[in-house]
Amino acid sequence: MITRMPRSCVAHRAALLDFVDGQPRTDASAAALSHLERCRACEEELAGIVRTVAALRRLGRLAAAAEPPAHAWPALRARVTRRADRWMPRFSIAGLAVSAALVVMISLPATISPGGADWSYRGAPARQEDAHPARPVVQRPFGRQAVTPTVAVAAPGPGRHIDRRVYGEAAWAPEVGVMKSRPR
Amino acid sequence: MQADDLDAFEAFFGRHRTLIYRTAYGLTGDRQAAEEVLQDTFARAYTHRATLLPDLSPVPWLHRVALNLCYSRLDRRRVKAEPIAESTAQLRDGAIEPAEQAEQRELRQIVREGIAALPTKHQSVVVLYYLNGLSLQETATSLGIAIGTVKSRLHYALANLRDHLERDRRFAHDYRPLGRKEELEVPPA
């Protein structure tokens, strides 16, 4: 069963708590004390609060005797400065890595192709067969007819480079500027 | 402080370190853990120094971080967080009996658990007012709230804490506050 606290008790609880906490007495606390003499519930409540406050104060006395150690600041200083310094070599390494990557990207085409990259577009193929030669059909005993895969390569343009050493000279058709097929 | 000024940070640390250390020590009961919480709290403050507003008190922020660190530490380690060195010192001095020592340690742990069960805004006022011994005005100033709000939160916190503690059989039956035995002891029937 839930019992509601009487309104008169509610009115005095705050003053009673002030009294427990050692706050200066006021008219409210005098009225609360006179209420306490008549009210058993408030008396029990107050006893519980007194025990709670005493337990807290005891814990507080334990804490009040504690002082932070003298080496706290040097340790903290070392920690925060170490944390700040730790980023410096990371930035250096990252910077070096980015610089190296840029150098490689810039110099790679000239290194692979001794004559330099051939950016000149030689025009569209004269015949359609030169650009897209017919795929040879492989006859199989049964099943679907397989088509030899070819690599469709667009004409080299800016940003696109065909490596002759990888694909071989035969794959390169300088007259039309396209790669016919990928060597196996 | 917002710039990388270590001298300003040292002054900031010197101003607030005792409060944070005592909070941590009160909640963990372990000097080493309290020192770690102190270091971690201010290391975070240094990391977030750019976001700390100069015209607002940093105490609520520091306090919140310290409380979270204390509770995460207590949850993680489930420490029966009483310093062995202090216990043995008290035993050596003959100031306290071993059984009573163990009982007090257990009761302190119950109180810490009770504080941990409070809502966060109530935790802050309880820790500052009761554990750190600040006045109502100082607590209000530190948290940037009105003094009436502090009193209101304290009242609710005490009521909650009292319920929590009274529900614990060890606290309700065994504990009697020092110096108030004559007031609180139930006369024999």
Image (cartoon, coloured by chain):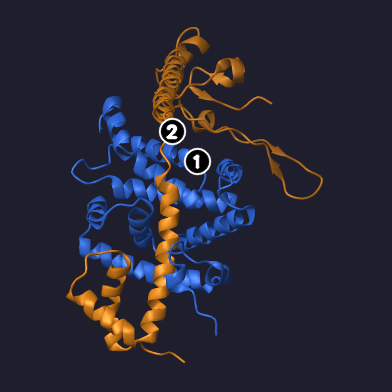
Q: Which chain is blue?
A: B
Image check: A143 left or right of A32? Answer: right
- Mark 2: which secondary structure? loop
Residue B170 image position (x, y, % from top left): 58, 68
Q: Residues within 10 Å of mark 2 (few under 14, many from 20)?
A: few
* Image disc number at residue B31: 1
Chain under callout 2: A
Q: Residue at x 33, y 58 (%)?
A: B125
Alpha carbon distance from label 2 to label 1: 9 Å
Residue A157 in view in this figure: no
Residue B45 image position (x, y, % from top left): 35, 39
- In the rendered image, the vertical position of residue B80 relative to residue A49, given as above or below: above
* Tag 2–tag 1 contact (CB < 8 Å): yes
Chain under callout 1: B
Tell me the amino acid under the disc marked 1: Arg
> Do discs 2 and 1 share a chain?
no
Q: Locate the N terminus of chain B by quadrant.
A: top left
Front residue of this view, candidates A33 and B30: A33
Q: Residue at x 48, y 58 (%)?
A: B112
Q: Residue at x 46, y 26 (%)?
A: A155
Q: Residue at x 50, y 10 (%)?
A: A111
Image check: A101 left or right of A140? Answer: left
Q: Which chain is orange?
A: A
Tell me the amino acid under the disc marked 2: Pro
Front residue of this view, candidates B122 and B168: B168
Image check: A19 left or right of A40? Answer: left
Front residue of this view, candidates A140 and A184: A184
Residue B126 image position (x, y, % from top left): 36, 59
Q: Residues within 10 Å of mark 1 (few under 14, many from 20)?
A: many
Residue B155 image position (x, y, % from top left): 32, 69
Residue A70 in view in this figure: yes
Residue indicated by mark 2:
A69
